[in-house]
Image (cartoon, rainbow, N blue to C red):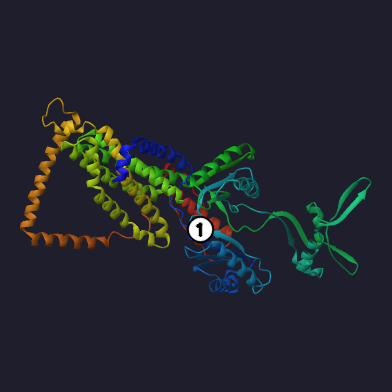
Amino acid sequence: MWIVRLALRRPYTFVVLALVIILLTPVVLLRTPVDIFPDINIPVISLVWTYNGLQPQEMEQRITSNVERGVTTLVSDVEHIESQSLSGIAVIKVFFQPGANIQTALAQTAAISQTFLRFLPPGTTPPLVIIYSASTVPVIQIGLTSDTLSEQQLFDFGNYFIRTQLATVPGAATPFPYGGKQRVISVDINPTSLQAKGLSAVDIVNAVSAQNLILPTGTAKLGTLEYNVEMNGSPQTIEELNDLPVKTVNGATIYMREVAHVRDGFSPQTNIVLSNGQRGVLMSIYKTGTASTIDIVDRVKQMLEYNKGSVPEGLHISTFFDQSLYVRASIQGVIREAIIAACLTAVMILLFLGNWRSTLIIAISIPLSILVSILCLSALGQTINIMTLGGLALAVGILVDDATVEIENINRNLAMGKETVQAILDGAQQIAVPALVSTLCICIVFIPMFFLSGVAKFLFVPLAEAVSFAMLASYMWSRTIVPTLAMYLLSTEDEYRADEHVGEKMGFFRRYQQGFERSFEKFRGGYQRALVIALQSPKLFAVCFLAFCVFSVLIAGFLGRDFFPKVDAGQIRLHMRARTGLRIEETARLADQVNGVIRETIPKDELTTVLD
């Protein structure tokens, strides 16, 4: 009650407070990350082990299994482990409990990996340790294709130019490109000549390693200057590599060109990217941390546009996937539905109250409550996503309760002939406790969501927070801004309530509302008659009600269950599995055949890109 008296005594204070919130919210919104879902902070650490040439079965038995046992027993807060063993590569994903300290887990995992390295097969390289999260997902994929540039040139441009530029985008992480060919200097050994000379492949490796060195040897002081001196034994051309001496046997020097051929080539391809049947390079940009998906995508596009002049002639850069489109569409859809809900709510209030002044007061309290909720969510580190916006849209229809009940009670006191200020005080006091209990009951419903675990917790807690903050803000505004506005807008309301004649004095809204009330009274009369019939036959009504409940439970089993509803994203994803051991060139040929079938099946006007 004291806060209502304070609001009536100092009305400008709360009006200014409302204006400050209205002006502050856009600033906060611009700094709040925007994403399709809340930040799902389930910590995951990936260990990538490499041993070139080792078969998948050997990788699993010699590396993957040993590391899994060590991590399971010596690293704390492990929830479960997933692993994948490929040819020369083992990827181990360690999933931790939601409340685990990821930095402690990272230190323990790295220490265990280094300890186990001495027990693994000789030649195993130290693992690449990567912190991963469920929110670390691709937000945009870029494709590089060209009719004039080779796959090697495409890979080099993507890896050494675009990737380094993308490293400056906050919140973006860009791994190595997929597809293309990596340039290497290859030494092709001639086994027949090697055997005839009495040499082995180890001799070739030793010769290249020993004669491809650059060693600093000190400095040379000549006159007033000092020079750095180095021993440079690194060949500068392919011809010089072919002329390297390999070994001297019986006084005769055997050169590299006699037992091998050195060429400028590329390493064996492990993946091939096809864009509409044309080979190219695919670059995936991932979102890290709580960065905004829309900001990352916009900055990546700005970077590509800025560096368009540095792109080699004939190189085409295209976007295969852009998550910001789905984020914007989802958020705009939720906002649109929330605005429609607010407008419909205002129309219904106008129909039932029949007074534009009362409707205006209630309509002002709705966005103010939503703005307060947005400020609270931003202060807690939440993002703008479909869950928080969905919670606000859900709360729109409930936010009107506090203000509507208070306005109606104030009008009732005005109709009793009380002064405006006294009517406001009495009306607010009479419904203060019931309104508070009603608000708390709605908030209590969402308390169990805070005890959820796993992905459900990260998804539904923001929704619960959005609704709860909006409801509490609604009650606060009903104690402050609603009485303040009522003091000015309802100052002559007693004249409207005292006038019982339907004449020219009665406004349009009042006359229309009376017609609506007469129609509603007819509807209510029909409902009362139906209720009387139900009360006269309680057993029949109870049987029908139970039958309806049983039928509803039975058909619930046919609805199906899924984690998320199906969304038409305009994409079809096919997974093709070839037999084990098939060469990558043959796998690419099979992908070309599938590509052809897709183009024969889907009309050209409905197909944009086929990415293999």
420 lies above or below 224: above
Numbered circles on residues, count: 1
- The answer to whether residue 261 is left or right of residue 547 is right
The answer to whether residue 360 shows anywhere in this view is no
- Which residue of the protein is positioned furthest toward the right in this rendering? 223
Say whether residue 43 is left or right of residue 260.
Answer: left
Residue 609 spot, x, y in % from top left: 48, 46
Which residue shows up at 41% across the image and 48% down it? 376
- Residue at image location 48% in from the left, 60% down from the top: 42
> Is residue 426 visible from the viewing direction of this image?
yes
Asked whether 494 or 332 is in front, the reply is: 494
In the foreground, 468 or 256 = 468
- Residue in front for this viewpoint, 247 or 357: 357
Q: Secondary structure at mark 1?
A: loop
Can you say whether 463 is above or below 342 in the image?
Answer: below
Q: Amino acid under label 1?
A: Ser
Could you say where residue 498 lies in the image, as x and y percent from the top left? 14, 32
- What crowding class fits label 1: few (fewer than 14 Cα within 10 Å), some (14-19), or many (20 or more)? some
Place residue 450 in its image quadrant. bottom left
Q: Is residue 453 above or below residue 411?
A: below
Please provide percent x and percent y for residue 591: 51, 55
Residue drawn at 27 percent across, 35 percent down: 487
Classify residue 551 by image quadrant: bottom left
Q: Residue furthest top?
A: 504
Q: Position of residue 179 (x, y in %)?
A: 59, 53
Q: Name the residue tied to disc 1.
A: 133
Q: Is 439 on the left or on the right of 495, as rendered?
A: right
